[in-house]
Image (cartoon, helix red, strand yellow):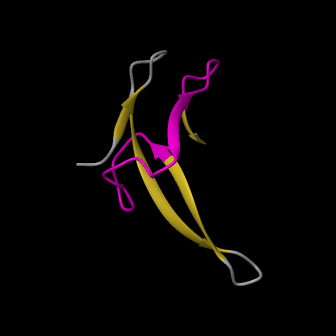
Amino acid sequence: MAFSVQSKKSGKTYFLHRRLQKLKGGREVTLYYFAGVAGEGAIDALPAGYIVSENERTGLPLLKKG
């Protein structure tokens, strides 16, 4: 089951995803993002050291290093 969070503003459920992105120099970075549907790349748990926050204006969830 993918990690999910419900928006306090809209009530919509968002699912956490992870994707590896290769940069120009060849280095790879991990990108975390929330989507409305659990698709490819959905992960089951919150990464260590991160907390979920919500944009007050839009209601969209964000990951922050905590």
User: Of 63 and 11, which appears nearest the observer?
Assistant: 63
User: Of 34 and 30, which appears nearest the observer?
Assistant: 30
Q: Quadrant of the C terminus?
A: top right
Residue furthest out toward the left: 1
Residue furthest out toward the top: 9
Q: Is residue 2 magenta?
A: no
Q: Is residue 57 above or below residue 50?
A: above
Q: Is residue 28 above or below residue 30?
A: below
Residue furthest out toward the bottom: 26
Residue 54 percent across, percent down from the top left:
55, 26
Residue 29 percent across, percent down from the top left:
62, 68
Tag count: 0
Q: Which secondary structure is most common in the magenta stretch?
A: loop
Q: Residue at 38% across / 32% down in the picture?
A: 5
Residue 25 percent across, percent down from the top left:
77, 82
Q: Is residue 45 magenta?
A: yes
Q: Is residue 26 above or below residue 14?
A: below
Q: Which residues are magenta?
A: 34-60
User: Of 14 and 50, which appears nearest the observer?
Assistant: 50
Q: Residue at 62% across / 18% down in the picture?
A: 56
Q: Residue at 55% across / 30% down in the picture?
A: 53
Q: Is residue 62 above or below residue 8?
A: below
Where, by quadrant of the figure, is residue 57 drawn? top right
